[in-house]
């Protein structure tokens, strides 16, 4: 089966080079890469040039917005399997081979997800079907692989959700897509043994702000996206309250321990999830 890999990117070059290197090292070679370039300049031309003859590669441009870029890419796909790698991730060399074999062996499943490489406890350690309640621990965009039939049924991403959307809802576009796929009757499977490296390490120095300088705007925007999805998909009120209680408890513990940065982070999360569910902008 052929893969269509849609990579939306803005502002990165070294990370893109790392991903391209990992893609060229794949043991499974039936794939196309569709790069949706949202940069205002030609910084990617030199990065992409060495790979033009190594695998099928399209370099396209779009306006800013992650969901918008992915929708533009979906119009170009020719593969039976579709994925959405981040512009700062890398694939293990046998990843596409693993995914291809899964879909051959499991015709009853319409999608497959994995997790970031590492030991983060937020990701489910058990494999199994994805449902609306466990999706939050089993679905992250750069590990999602879907059959073409899912794309044809679900349609485009919600362009009001995600980074660069120009709305308060700074995340949730991939969770929304999986929820809509489940609502359409598709069977999605999670395998924690399927991992993607994210984020990749690059040699370019990154300046890390001090706690006093750190801006929690992104934390708030991501939480707003979660709250928006809880309302959009009419989750039961007990699950909504659970999503408020977790950061609320974290906030209380951080206050007791005098951890100011954690207090700010948990407060931004709690506030965002509450406001997002209420529909506040």
Image (cartoon, rainbow, N blue to C red):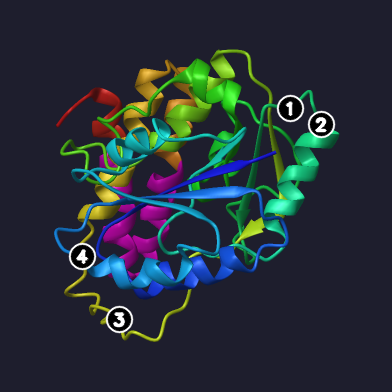
Closest to the camera, between mark 1 and mark 3, is 1
- Give the mark nearer the N terminus: 4 vs 3: 4
Name the one closer to the observer, 250 or 257: 250
- Check disc 2: other Cα within 10 Å, few if <14, some if 14-19, many if 20+: few
From the image, tell me which residue sits under label 1.
109
- Check disc 3: other Cα within 10 Å, few if <14, some if 14-19, many if 20+: few
Asked whether residue 134 is in view, the answer is: no
CA distance separating discs 1 and 4: 40 Å
- Give the mark nearer the N terminus: 1 vs 3: 1
Highlighted magenta segment, given as a residue range: 246-272
From the image, tell me which residue sits under label 3.
206
Above or below for 208 versus 44: below
CA distance separating discs 2 and 4: 42 Å
Q: Secondary structure at mark 3?
A: loop
Asked whether residue 250 is drawn in magenta, I would say yes
Q: Which mark is residue 42?
A: 4
- Give the mark nearer the N terminus: 2 vs 3: 2
Whether tag 1 and tag 2 are in contact, CB under 8 A, the answer is yes
Residue 135, horizontal then vertical, whole percent:
57, 34
Residue drawn at (51%, 25%), measured in percent from left and top?
151
């Amino acid at each position: 089966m052929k893969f269509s890999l849609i990579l939306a990117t803005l502002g990165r070059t070294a990370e893109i080079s790392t991903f391209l290197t990992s893609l060229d090292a794949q043991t499974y070679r039936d794939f196309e890469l569709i790069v949706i370039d949202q940069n205002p300049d030609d910084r990617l031309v030199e990065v992409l040039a060495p790979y033009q003859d190594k695998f099928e590669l399209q370099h396209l441009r779009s306006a800013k917005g992650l969901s918008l870029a992915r929708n533009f890419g979906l119009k170009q796909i020719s593969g039976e399997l579709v994925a959405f790698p981040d512009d700062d991730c890398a694939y293990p060399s046998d990843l596409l081979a693993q995914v291809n074999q899964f879909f051959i062996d499991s015709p009853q499943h319409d999608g497959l997800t994995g997790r970031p490489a590492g030991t983060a406890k937020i990701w489910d350690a058990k494999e199994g079907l994805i449902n609306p309640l466990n999706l939050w621990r089993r679905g992250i965009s750069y590990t999602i692989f879907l059959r073409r039939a899912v794309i044809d049924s679900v349609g485009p991403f919600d362009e009001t959700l995600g980074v660069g959307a120009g709305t308060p809802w700074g995340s949730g576009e991939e969770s929304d897509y999986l929820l809509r796929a489940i609502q359409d009757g598709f069977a999605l499977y999670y395998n924690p043994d399927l991992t993607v490296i994210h984020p990749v390490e690059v040699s370019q120095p990154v300046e890390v702000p001090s706690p006093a300088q750190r801006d929690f705007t992104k934390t708030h925007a991501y939480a707003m996206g979660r709250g928006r999805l809880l309302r959009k998909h009419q989750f039961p009120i007990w699950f909504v309250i659970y999503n408020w209680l977790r950061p609320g408890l974290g906030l209380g513990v951080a206050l007791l321990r005098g951890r100011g940065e954690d207090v700010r982070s948990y407060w931004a999360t709690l506030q965002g999830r509450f406001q997002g569910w209420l529909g506040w902008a």
